[in-house]
Amino acid sequence: MIRLILALLLMAFCAAAHAHKPSDSYLAVKAESGRIEGQWDIALRDLEYAIGLDADGNGEITWGELSARHQEVASYALARLQIAAGDAACTLQVTDHLVDQHSDGAYAVIRFGAECPAAGSLKIRYGLFFELDPTHRGLARIEAVGVTQTAVFGPERAEQTFNLATPSPAQQILDYVREGVWHIWIGFDHVLFLLSLLLPAVWQRVAGRWMPAQRFAPAFWEVFRVVTAFTVAHSITLSLAAVELVALPSRLVESVIAASVLLAALNNLFPLVSGRRWAMAFAFGLIHGFGFASVLTDLGLPRDALVSSLFGFNVGVELGQLAMVAVFLPLAFALRATWFYTRVVFAGGSMAVAVLATLWLLERAFVISIFS
Amino acid sequence: MRVIPLLPLLTVAALLSSGLASGEPYRPKGPAVVLERLPIKAGDARSRALAADRARLAAAPRDPALAMKVARAYYELAGAEGDPRYIGYAEAALAPWVADADAPADILYMRGKLLQWRHEYAPALELFGRALQREPGHYDTLSGRSAVLTVLADYAGARRDCEQLRVREAELYWASCLAYIDGQTGQAAAAERRLADLLARHPDTGPAGQLWLLTRLADLATRLGRPADADGYYRRALALGVDNQLLLANYGDFLIDQGRAAEAVALLRDWTRADVLLLRLTLAEQALRVPEFKAHAQTLRERFAAAALRGDTLHRQEESRFQLRIERNAARALELAVANWAIQREPYDARILLEAAVAAGRRDAAQPVLDWLAQSRHEDPQLTALANSLAGVKP
């Protein structure tokens, strides 16, 4: 009968999906010049199975029972983790024992440190629990010189090497240039602000009325003035914010940016400022700079290469703007006298931008969600 | 520094913040603070015996009988508790034979079961095949393979294995094996009569065997439109006092479907560790609009994020329902259900896909399930209703 019971029992499971959270540990390693700091979260359930924590066998693990065995926990775990910087092994020292809750229960938190020579790579050999539970995984996050890498350690991938080499300064600047281009490209509010200011550049105001510009040169120089003023202004505030000299609340910044887009568009429909649009570009450019800065903060600026990466990002933003202008200006100049440009692009476009900016403004100022 | 594109960075950061850093580590206030409650007390007789076997196995790791004993014990625990750790422990017990194609049939079979648990059906079938080469007519392997083939909707193959059991096993073994497949393939009423008859004529069947029969009977009665009888079967199964994930999951779904969410909550309240059951609990709490719903939904969210970090795809069924009912993301739910259907094709998998397809208005994605429904002649008014509501959707 026992055989039947077992067989039927086994059959009964086959149909079910078993998606209970499996055994994972969470390893975070931070490498800075000559020093490694780490935190390793290991499930109490797994430690119980490996070395036994529930001293009184009552099915509960208390902080007292865990702390009584901190020594064993540390030596058991650290014997199964080897970190080497380049070829030099690092001797790991436990600095603290804490506790944390994950989605599936309590974890022992081991904090450790090691003096390690600075090297271009970090080699981690992970062997926790594999002999007890081959399905165990070590989920690792390695942070060095501002780059975060993640990895999953398993029995088949117990040793992994992480490249920590800092990219060459030229490469680094280039990366930031690319980010700058990307962010002007996806930053619709900046683009629309600039375009709204540029739309009338191919015209000139004669006796209170718009007239198509006669020659290309004045249009070009008008665009040049506006773009340069915008650039200079946002470069100033971007730099100030990036070095943390000035900080503005992002709700304010984002709201004012939306307002600037709205004003630029309305100014086309009901002209107030017609002569000195570059001044408007400059004034609002200051605020747009804070907007760019928040992007840079998200990226995380390297402290050792602050100036060059800031420069790179700015150059990228400029290149992005120039590319836009290079497409816009010839087209706008060619079409400037047409009905299409006057009515559809200029009036219709400005109107659409104004509506969009109003929605942005409402969304950002009152923290409500209109798009989405 | 290398600039990392923002979007992937944020995605990773979100995953890390949910999976890796679930909060700030802290120092508990005093030694008496209870940090964790273990599912099994170290002091109780069963776990003491298991621990003793484990210790003996550590001294003699190549003893096949002892290894099988330990592996079986952990496999059963996994089925009772729903914790995949036990599958890992069982795997570790069988590690000496991991590359051994000529291992004893028992061990090949058990390794196949462990693979099956992880939904790795093709390698599981290969191991079953090898076990049967070593020992033709190996009972566990034949019934196990029949079950895998049923999961893959290969009913003819599954039936063949049941028929083979007929050669040397008693009626109960092969008859329940066949009746189960009949119940999936258009003969639900006959299958129910057959299983009920077997249950009545074998009162000496142990609790696990009875539980299997009763769980199947409950499913058949549900599909035959007799919920009161189904409820009776479920209650009899629960009264056996055996923890079993499949029973709890099925009864939980049944109660929710019957609009008895409060009873589902009572049934599953203490099972938050197992994702399969936590999902049902959360769905029941959602139906009742109770405050616990939010915290449990968040726990599920974090568990799915942690599984994604690991690269696990075992929880597609649960994640699909979670996306559909709780995140209300029909497109993602459908994606998961389609991926799941590519791996396994049981009625429950069909239900998940149909529900997601109906919500997403995507009849095309459900076509393989509609085909399966027609070919298998599987009887289930719930699936039929879902399929009919898809018929109104443009292909």
Image (tube, coloured by chain):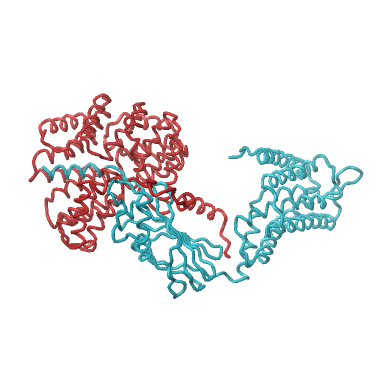
Chain colours: A cyan, B red
Q: For this view, does B1 lie left or right of residue B381? A: right
- The quadrant the N terminus of chain A occupies is top left
Q: For this view, does B250 lie left or right of residue B105? A: right
How far from the left and from the top, in percent, is residue A205? Answer: 88, 46
Q: For this view, does A242 lie left or right of residue B12? A: right
Q: Nearer the viewer, residue B186 or A44?
A: A44
Q: Which of A32 and B170 is in front in this view?
A: A32
Q: In this view, does A173 lie above or below B117?
A: below
- The quadrant the C terminus of chain A occupies is top right
Q: Is there any visible trace of residue B395 in the rendered image?
A: no
How far from the left and from the top, in percent, is residue B144? Answer: 20, 47
Which residue is located at x 66 percent, y 41 percent? Answer: A364
Q: Is there any visible trace of residue B97 in the rendered image?
A: yes
For residue B176, which quarter of the picture? Answer: top left
Residue extending farthest to the bottom is A87
How far from the left and from the top, in percent, is residue B58? Answer: 21, 61
How far from the left and from the top, in percent, is residue A320? Answer: 68, 58
For residue B284, which quarter of the picture? Answer: top left
Q: How many marks?
A: 0
Q: Which of A105 and A248 is in front in this view?
A: A105
Which residue is located at x 70 percent, y 43 percent? Answer: A255
